[in-house]
Amino acid sequence: METIESAIVGTGAIAGFHAASLGRLDRSRLVAATDIDPAALAAFGEKWSVPRLYPDLESLLAAESPDLVHLCTPPGLHAPQAVAALGRGASVLCEKPPARSLAELDAIGSAQTDGAFFATVFQHRFGSGAARLRGLMGDSRLGRPTAAVCHTLWFRPDSYFAVPWRGGFDVEGGGPTMGHGIHQFDLLLSIMGEWESVVAVAVRQAKPTATEDLSVAIVTFANGAIATVVNSLVSPRESSYLRFDFEHATVELDHVYGYGDDDWTVTAAPGHEDPVAQAWAAGPAGVRSGHDAQLTVVLDALAAGAPPPVSLVDARLTVELVAGIYASAFTGRPVARGELGPDSPFYHRMDGTGAPWA
């Protein structure tokens, strides 16, 4: 395919990021959009010069044959909309979280067919700093990873939760663990690899929400490293901070909603300054994290007939950690990866049989 034709589902704020990126990239054309709010749809269509607008996804798929459907809708709609688009032979790029549960994510996986792929927007994987660090995993100049920190310390006012689909497990799927910190710890997992076990707490500290507004987890990885993961919506000075400690170096990323190369810091252990500096300097550079970075790779993959990133396999590792954090927090015990199968209530809902608060 020389040109990838896209349709956007849902015209809220995040849809504008998709439309803007499509307008900046080669081989892409926005051909259609849909939203249940006629006024929002009309405004979106005018702003982004969308040639055809539809009142719902069903009518769009009946009239159009897009190569890629962008799901920019609330989390509770992702699974049925993804299944519908995949069933029509369209690939899907879905905003996070890809589904409200492991059960929904596995149902999406069952709907994939040859040539119709499902990918999740986890754009922080695609900045050059992350690519540089992934390329150095296993490099003797940095040494073995030993510890990590992944803190999403954000703030949301009470009015944020007045939006009907926010603040509940039924529609949003969860709180900051599911909808906010997931970006940072997906980046953590993309670098550190498979996790083995998690122990966590989740609480409601201050916000008018049925979900947690703060969770704290300790995650053990297959490579032996241990990470602390904090997901907060009660932190007025916002920060997204990741730290990776190796035998011979510390690598840090400090940003809020997106990063560039200057947001990374590398500190070598005494006696390892030169090899660490040489290793870091040799990596890729110049790419900010964001929708442009991921969509570039997605369009390249679709043009080649290959599965685009982030695949269902990769996204499932992240969503399984979300489920593991909730399961550990709500049962008071460690949870191992692979433990939460169809027999577990946490496979079907992130709050399992219910959160431990009223």
Image (cartoon, rainbow, N blue to C red):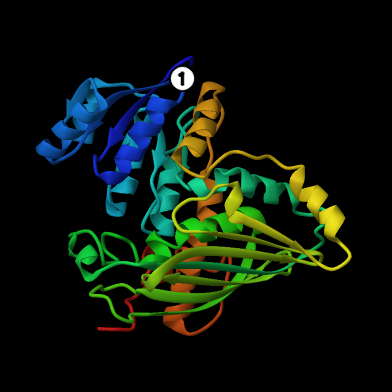
Instruction: Name the quadrant containing residue 22.
Output: top left
* SS category of the residue bearing label 1: loop
Q: Position of residue 52 (x, y in %)?
A: 21, 22
* 91 with respect to 58 (left or right): right
Q: Position of residue 280 (x, y in %)?
A: 75, 49
Q: Looking at the picture, does residue 336 appear above or below residue 160?
A: below
Residue at the spot x=72%, y=42% of the render? 283
Q: Nearer the viewer, residue 78 or 227?
A: 227
Amino acid type, mark 1: Arg
Q: Which residue is at the far top?
A: 2
Residue ID for mark 1: 27
* 339 with respect to 31 (left or right): right
Q: Residues within 10 Å of mark 1 (few under 14, many from 20)?
A: some
Res. 64 visible in picture: yes
Q: Nearer the viewer, residue 235 or 31?
A: 235
Q: Looking at the picture, does residue 45 appear above or below residue 102?
A: above
Residue at the spot x=26%, y=63% of the render? 170
Residue at the spot x=67%, y=64% of the render? 244
Q: Position of residue 323 (x, y in %)?
A: 46, 66
Q: Looking at the picture, does residue 218 appear above or below residue 303?
A: below
Res. 140 visible in picture: no
